[in-house]
Image (spheres, helix red, strand yellow):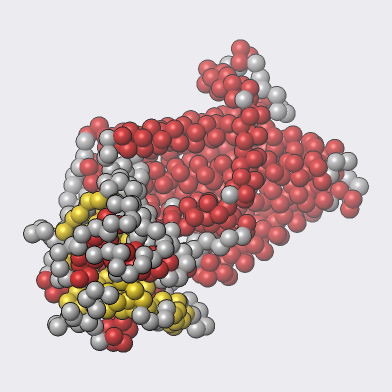
């Protein structure tokens, strides 16, 4: 047998170094493979790329070992490509909050990728189609820009000012001075936060737009507050509160109206696309754009309302003797009427997902992550929520205080309709708010499971994330560049150190995309060119498990990915293994002539391929270079193998 090296590439959800290689070694032990070298982890300096952000030396762990098959004496040299630390979420509560922040505002990278893909697809289409794509793209980008910058700045300035307003009570005798002092302090704090974000935006890989918006809001608030102090006559607290809340209401109504119009235009564009039955590939890209936009806005609204609920309790409990704190809390409480509608939106979307999931499961069909039904429901309910929000502000402002008017006393039918809906939501507000307030406690108590789920999403997000602080004309996908550079470095070192004549890359999930592009077999638009690893006198084999290339990436972004057809870039063989119920990885439509070889195994989801006996039958056959051997007798056929190695001679 040729001297063989195996490079293991883990997928999403394998955040610790050596986990994937350990699982593969345990699985192969059932076929008589035993470790013959001490396992070690070497810390290798990362290769220099355009993604290098710091002059400090950075390293990543490379696990390695060697195993031998007792019956034949064949030996394998294994090394693992580890990339989980590039997007892994730490286990602290602060890390959890940062991960949620990253999820909410990182969804824009999916929108950008889908928009670019849709634009490429429509280059040869008519004006109407191109106009629809441009309209949808503009609406999504505008809605995300409003949420990511101005709305964050608006809510932060209001929250900081509210806190300073109550804290400033002992410093002055007049309430108007307290309000103006709180406005000045809040604006200064926000401007300082904007400076910090601007300075560290590149390191944090956050968009500089948020920092600019915070700076504009802080400076504008400071100028207005100083102008009120020096040039305006003394105000009563009632006049100050009325002017501030009136300006806040007008600003919120304008932003809410803009967001509602954007969502309505997105919904109308989606209906037009469905009505005219455009090509399905274009509809998929449009679905991603609309779903990620509305999901980001929905999550943002949900957590902002939770934050204001927490602030209300802080104002009431921390300053129990201040009547102004209670008055301010009551004023904030006016906007909490919206919370039941947001919670109801997520409940309806969750029910839709469960129905789709169980329907597909019962029929053993692949289910796509983003469903047109879900996006339609989400868009419709988001628009309804926004309409209620905008009209509710107008109604409450016209009436004064937080008392809803009697519907019969309203002149406009739309006002009566909104008041009736808000009154209906008011009846169940306590239940929704109680569940919403309990949600952060549940998230913190179960943050280990939540962090695992966020790891999965953020690992995929790293594939699309671009660094918007890059001065180049086109932003760089720094995390993905670092991932590919690690893969190429491990492959080159493995071939050099072992002198292998045969290289087999075994990868799972997101690791399959890394392997395909790192080997030079996959071309991704706007990515740096990846030269082929294939070289003379080297047998190159590729085993992919749960590969998302067709079911996820090429399904939603068909113009972005292409397999290289030239023989010099192709592996000598490619074996793709997938499960019947894997909602991420399926078969891959390759280059024809049985390339790749697609094999379907039993329905056990997307995880734990490494120790699945039915999967290992095919892996062992490829490692031996012969027909797959019979299944082992001891492990349960078709299920994950035990982590305990079997004794010698127990398998054939």
Which one is nearer the viewer's eye here, 108 or 472? 108
Residue 278, image x, y percentages: 21, 39
Residue 124, image x, y percentages: 17, 51
Give the residue at the far right of this rendering: 173
Residue 626, image x, y percentages: 15, 68
Q: Is residue 465 visible?
A: no
**Tally of marks:** 0
Give the residue at the far front of this rendering: 649
* Image position of 331 (left or right of 459): right
Give the residue at the far top of this rendering: 408
Which one is nearer the viewer's eye here, 164 or 368? 368
* Image position of 77 (left or right of 407): left
In the picture, which quadrant includes the N terminus? bottom left
Q: Quadrant of residue 534?
A: bottom left
Which one is nearer the viewer's eye here, 649 or 70? 649
At a point 79% along the width and 40% down the height, the residue shown is 316
Does residue 409 lie above or below 205 as drawn? above
Residue 651, image x, y percentages: 27, 64
Does residue 308 lie above or below 500 as drawn? above
Q: Is residue 347 visible?
A: yes
Which one is nearer the viewer's eye here, 532 or 327? 532
Q: Quadrant of residue 264?
A: top left
At a point 36% along the width and 57% down the height, the residue shown is 641
* Image position of 562 (left or right of 265): left
In the picture, which quadrant includes the C terminus? bottom left
At a point 40% along the width and 37% down the height, the residue shown is 353
At a point 59% along the width and 25% down the height, the residue shown is 425
């Amino acid at each position: 047998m040729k001297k063989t090296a195996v490079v293991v590439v883990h997928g999403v959800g394998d955040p610790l170094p050596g986990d994937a290689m350990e699982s593969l070694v345990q699985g192969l032990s059932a076929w008589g493979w035993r470790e013959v070298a001490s396992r070690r982890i070497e810390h290798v300096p990362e290769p220099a790329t355009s993604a290098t952000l710091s002059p400090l030396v950075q390293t990543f762990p490379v696990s390695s070992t060697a195993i031998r098959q007792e019956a034949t004496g064949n030996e394998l040299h294994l090394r693992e490509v580890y990339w989980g630390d590039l997007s892994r979420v730490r286990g602290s509560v602060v890390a959890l909050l940062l991960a949620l922040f990253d999820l909410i505002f990182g969804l824009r990278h999916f929108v950008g990728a889908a928009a670019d893909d849709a634009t490429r697809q429509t280059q040869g289409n008519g004006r109407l189609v191109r106009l629809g794509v441009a309209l949808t793209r503009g609406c999504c980008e505008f809605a995300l820009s409003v949420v990511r910058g101005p709305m964050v700045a608006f809510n932060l300035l209001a929250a900081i000012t509210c806190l300073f307003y109550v804290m400033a009570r002992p410093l002055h005798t007049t309430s108007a001075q307290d309000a103006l002092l709180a406005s000045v302090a809040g604006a200064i704090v926000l401007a300082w936060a904007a400076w910090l974000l601007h300075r560290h935006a590149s390191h944090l890989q956050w968009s500089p737009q948020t920092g600019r918006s915070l700076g504009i809001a802080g400076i504008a608030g400071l100028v207005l507050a100083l102008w009120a102090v020096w040039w305006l006559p003394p105000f009563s607290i009632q006049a100050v509160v009325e002017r501030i809340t009136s300006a806040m209401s007008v600003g919120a109504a304008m932003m809410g109206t803009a967001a509602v119009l954007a969502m309505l235009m997105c919904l109308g564009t989606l209906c037009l696309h469905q009505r005219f039955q455009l090509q399905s590939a274009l509809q998929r890209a449009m679905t991603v754009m609309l779903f990620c936009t509305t999901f980001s806005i929905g999550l943002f609204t949900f957590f902002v309302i939770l934050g204001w609920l927490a602030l209300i309790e802080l104002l009431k409990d921390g300053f129990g003797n201040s009547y102004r704190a209670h008055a301010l809390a009551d004023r904030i409480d006016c906007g909490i009427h919206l919370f039941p509608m947001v919670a109801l939106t997520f409940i309806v979307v969750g029910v839709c997902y469960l129905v789709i999931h169980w329907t597909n499961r019962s029929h053993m069909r692949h289910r796509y992550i983003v469903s047109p039904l879900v996006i339609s429901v989400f868009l419709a309910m988001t628009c309804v929520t926004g309409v209620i929000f905008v009209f509710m502000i107008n109604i409450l402002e016209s009436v004064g205080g937080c008392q809803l008017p009697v519907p019969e006393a309203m002149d406009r039918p739309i006002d009566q309709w909104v008041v009736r809906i808000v009154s209906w939501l008011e009846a169940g507000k306590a239940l929704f708010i109680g569940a919403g307030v309990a949600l952060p406690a549940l998230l913190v108590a179960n943050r280990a499971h939540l962090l695992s789920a966020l790891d999965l999403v953020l690992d995929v997000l790293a594939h699309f994330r671009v660094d918007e602080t890059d001065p180049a004309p086109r932003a760089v996908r720094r995390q993905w560049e670092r991932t590919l550079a690690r893969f190429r470095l491990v492959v080159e070192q493995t071939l050099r150190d072992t002198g292998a004549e045969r290289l087999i890359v075994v990868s799972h999930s997101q690791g399959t995309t890394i392997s395909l592009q790192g080997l030079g077999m996959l071309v991704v638009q706007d990515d740096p060119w990846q030269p082929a690893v294939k070289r003379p006198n080297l047998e190159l084999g590729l085993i992919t498990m749960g590969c998302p290339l067709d079911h996820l990436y090429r399904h939603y972004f068909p113009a972005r990915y292409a397999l290289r057809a030239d023989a010099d870039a192709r592996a000598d063989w490619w074996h793709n293994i997938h499960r019947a119920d894997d909602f991420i990885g399926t078969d891959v439509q390759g280059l024809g002539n049985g390339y790749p070889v697609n094999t379907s195994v039993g329905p056990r989801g997307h995880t734990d391929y490494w120790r699945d006996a039915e999967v290992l039958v095919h892996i062992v056959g490829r490692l031996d270079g012969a027909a797959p051997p019979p299944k082992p007798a001891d492990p349960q056929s078709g299920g994950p193998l035990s982590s305990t190695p079997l004794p010698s001679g127990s398998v054939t």
